[in-house]
Image (cartoon, rainbow, N blue to C red):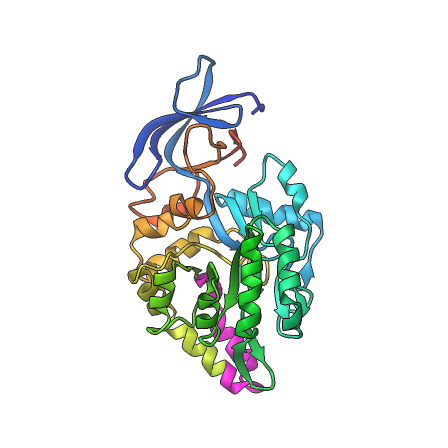
Amino acid sequence: MSDHTVLHVKGRVLVGPEDVRDELWCVDGRITFERPSAEAVTVEGWVLPGLVDAHCHVGLDRHGPVDEATSEKQALTDRDAGTLLIRDAGSPSDTRWIDEREDLPKIIRAGRHIARTRRYIRNYAHEIEPADLVEYVGREARRGDGWVKLVGDWIDRDAGDLTACWPRAEVGAAIAEAHRLGARVTAHCFAEDSLRDLVEAGIDCVEHATGLTEDTIPLFAERGVAIVPTLVNIATFPHLADGGQEKFPRWSAHMRRLYERRYDTVRAAFDAGVPVFVGTDAGGSLAHGLVAEEVEELTRAGIPPIDALAATAWGARAWLGRPSLEEGAPADLVVYGEDPRADVRVLAAPRRVVVNGRVVG
């Protein structure tokens, strides 16, 4: 299909959870609800805005940065699954070249992870000490697309368990610096200990958030701090715990406890009004293209299907400041054979994927 083909998308266009239109058109890569005079190629079905994976890593695998060919495969896998907007939650690779490709997902970058020395996966992060945190947060705020990613907790080998990585004063100053530069801050957190300090310091989002408790959930809700649970990643905790059982038994037991209560944690946060969004954590040890599985996991946790759908569609796009199916918006959309509101498993089988007004899958 040429770049200049007008696309007529008809059927049930889900502009919002309850706002259903009969049709839209894609003209010059943009959405319009006004019928153009040019002839159009027709695509039919149930239509959603391009899905969002709010925790994904393009340009990264389990060993560290990857080459452009591998990054391209990762982005294509996500695209073919219907993910057309990615918040890249930390990558050491320069993936700006993807922005020039009209057939690939759009990426919102958080720069490179910032971690304590020897307290994260090798080759992933800037590994620094607290005295340098403000400087590095400023650097990544300028390098990213409005987000910075901290590693909030990790295994402390001396303690034999997960512990917080940053003192309260330093993390507060670093978050204030990011906000001064117009960036939001998120943090990897598995355990309980770091959460109160991070939220009271002004953090905007927490990744995984398996350590939420009845004491910290109200604080998240009061401050409007979002979580991205990455339940398809949390499913790996038992395997990780088995691998560390002999050397770090306290850590292994802790990881199992976090896993066992994962659904209750997410549902309690949602019920309290904490914003919950879809993210897969693809690109480290997890495969790309798992967005449908993560939405289904949210429903297993007890989140109503329409809210789980919003967490990867309209709600997620609004949170990230990107348009959905709106007049003049980039024509990024996914077409399905059935109503995804009735059964979120429909997301696993896109009928058509449209990027910038072109059918690409």
Question: Vertical placement of 195 versus 61: above or below?
Answer: below
Residue 140, horizontal then vertical, whole percent: 64, 56
Residue 142 place in picture, x, y as percent: 64, 51
Look at the image and tell me whether residue 151 can be seen: no
Could you tell me how many numbered marks the image carries?
0
Q: Residue placed at 56% from the left, 85% from the top?
A: 160
32 relative to 96, above or below: above
Q: Residue at x 51, y 44 (%)?
A: 85
User: Is 211 one of the magenta-colored residues?
Assistant: no
349 and 221: which one is in front?
221
Q: Residue 170: percent from the left, percent from the top? A: 58, 70
Q: Residue at x 42, y 54 (%)?
A: 277
Q: Quadrant of residue 298?
A: bottom left
Magenta part of the chain: 229-251
Question: Quadrant location of the N terminus?
Answer: top right
Rendered location of residue 104, percent (x, y): 58, 40
Quarter of the figure with residue 340? top left
Residue under the point 71% across and 52% down: 67
Q: Is 32 positioned to the left or the right of 147 in the image?
A: left
Residue 235 lies in magenta, yes or no? Answer: yes
Q: Is residue 78 visible?
A: yes
In the image, 238 versus 197, the foreground residue is 197
Is 134 placed left or right of 315 in the picture?
right
* Residue projecting furthest to the top: 37
Q: Secondary structure of the magenta portion, mostly?
A: helix
Left or right for 272, reference 157 = left
In depth, the one of 160 and 300 nearer the eye is 160
